[in-house]
Amino acid sequence: MLMSKLIGKTSKKVEDEFNIDSQKLLLRSGMFRGISPGLYSVLPLGKRVIDKLLNLLSGELKEQDFQNVIVPSNTEFERAACLTLRNDLKSYKDLPKSIYNISSLEREKIKVKDGALKSKSFTALRSFSFYDNEQNMLDGFKKMKETYKTIFEEIGLSIIELKSYNHKNPVANCEELVVNCEKGDRRIFSCKACGYRALEEMADFHIEENDIEDMEIEPVHTPNIKTIKELEEYMNIEAGDLAKTLLVKAGDETIAIIIRGNRELNLYKLSTLLNVPIEDIKMADYEDIDGKIETVPGFVGPVELEGVRIIVDREITKIGSLVTGANKRDYHLKNVRYERDFLGDMIADVSYIGEDDKCPLCGEELTKENGIDVGKVLSVGRITDVKSMEYKNREGKPNSIYGASTYIDIYRLLSMIVERNHDEDGIIWPTKVAPYQVIVSILNIKKEDQIELGKRLYNELKDNSIEVILDDRNERAGAKFYDADLLGIPVRIVVARGAGENKVEFKLRWENEKEELNVDEALKRVVQLLK
């Protein structure tokens, strides 16, 4: 490729503000081009990187007998995959089967400062595998996770595998593939002492039992006080001394959730506990309560609460005396204790972790870090939402089909490679995904000996199947050096004053030192490095 013909000019700065550095570099290097808030075109250099990433991923999938398909992108992928193949999976001989799909997807909610990380339109690689039983599905789940992890490590990304919420099947396995990033949008709690690590919405935490004097339950008149803040001031207590009762609608059922006053209800944990999709859980309306539950909005409490199933957060059972609503207007109760004064139908972890909580495994301090997810691996479980998803076993009896799927956001993957591989001068591409492997820069295109040697290098590298771009532009030497660093192409060969003696400057992007080499030695070095 001749740089004089390349579409996508570089720039020294980008006016837009972004949360992480990689987004500026993708624009400055001419790989992406913003065309409206949150919407980007991918120019030739960026397209080459994306193609290489897709080839790496899909190449490994093909080795594992995945086959490429095109399915409608306006239909949920898992459902589209099942509808596509349900008539092809009728016998045990037809399983397992695996497909993958590369498509451009649309995102409804965006944050402009996230750049291409959360652009409106993006490229994704998705896969779906069909299995004859649960164990084979779980084995496939594990294999796919390890496959992606290995590929990412080959291109310089260290992946953290973290349990995540499964939007397809709340009770099934799901793991996010996360890259550490200081300004990432995924919060991670980790313990240096024992190695515990979890996403914020999935994190557990240590609970200490409080040994508190056993005092009789006592009603307290709290006129017109409904919020926790008002109650703290009126009764001179802290939010952690309260047990708040939240009435939620999960599907068609209204449920009372009892959590500590300084905690937030974790809908991800609740969805998993109830096996109800998170989008089907909301706070109960007055119509869900009126005449059905013996209580008063604003003063709901667990003592003598009837007409509703009660889920008690496990912390409530350990901390002793609490203040609760009295199910009576303008009244609260103090000295309330679990078991003595009320019971739950279920005890579970349904609270978010707090900033000062300790490790659930060893009780040591937890540290907070940030990351960005580049994909997911999830178990679908038994496929039940699509008719005719059954096969006949060796005895001719019908059996359920199980599924597992994966999802990789290519724009986020590309962004994380740049985020982890750059310096103050620009990108430093890993050789496997660099847009070109070598850049040959002719410093003075008015010098015939430089032009001749530059073209010779360019052609011989191409003949050796090396991906090379020739900077033949009529630009200053400083501009050519600047662009070479910004673009981050692994090997730079500069043709300058030594051309008459068949000498060139040889430099690797990740090293500071440059060498003067004979042109044949430079060619030999490139072939050894890249072949």
Image (cartoon, rainbow, N blue to C red):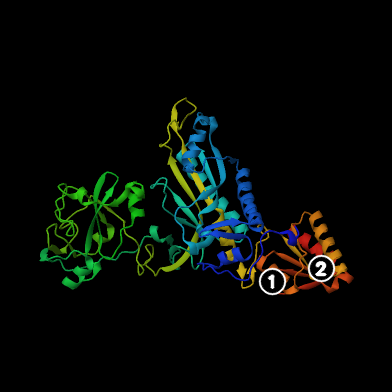
The residue under the point 34% across, 64% down is: 206
Within-10-Å neighbours for mark 2: few <14, some 14–19, many 20+: some
450 or 309, which is in the foreground? 450
Residue bearing the label numbered 2 = 445
Numbered disc in front, either 1 or 2: 2
Element type at mark 1: helix
Question: 129 and 71: which one is in front?
Answer: 71
Residue 217 coordinates in the image, percent (x, y): 12, 63
Q: Is residue 92 left or right of residue 443?
A: left
Please tell me which residue is depicted at 55% across the width and 68% down the height of the picture.
21
What percent of the width, then of the height, locates residue 120?
50, 54
Q: Residue at horizontal 60%, vertical 64%?
A: 27
Classify residue 411 as left or right of residue 332.
right
Q: CA distance from mark 1 to mark 2?
A: 17 Å
- Kind of residue indicated by mark 2: Ile
From this view, report whether residue 107 is shown above or below residue 489.
Answer: above
Asked if the residues shown at circle 1 and circle 2 are in contact, with their CB atoms under 8 angstroms apart, the answer is no
What is the quadrant of the C terminus in the image? bottom right
Q: Amino acid at mark 1?
A: Tyr
Examine the rendering and report whether any part of residue 157 can be seen: no
Determine which of the numbered discs, if any, sits on residue 329 in the image.
none
View extreme (front): residue: 36
User: Front-most of 198 and 413?
Assistant: 413
| Element marked by disc 2 | loop
Q: Across the whole image, how many numbered discs are drawn on residues?
A: 2
The residue carrying pointer 1 sits among few (fewer than 14), some (14 to 19) or many (20 or more) residues within 10 Å by Cα, namely: some
- The answer to whether residue 75 shows anywhere in this view is yes
Q: Quadrant of residue 417?
A: bottom right
Q: Position of residue 497 (x, y in %)?
A: 84, 74
Is residue 152 rendered to the left or right of residue 507?
A: left
Residue ID for mark 1: 482
Q: Hey, which quadrant is residue 486 in on the image?
A: bottom right
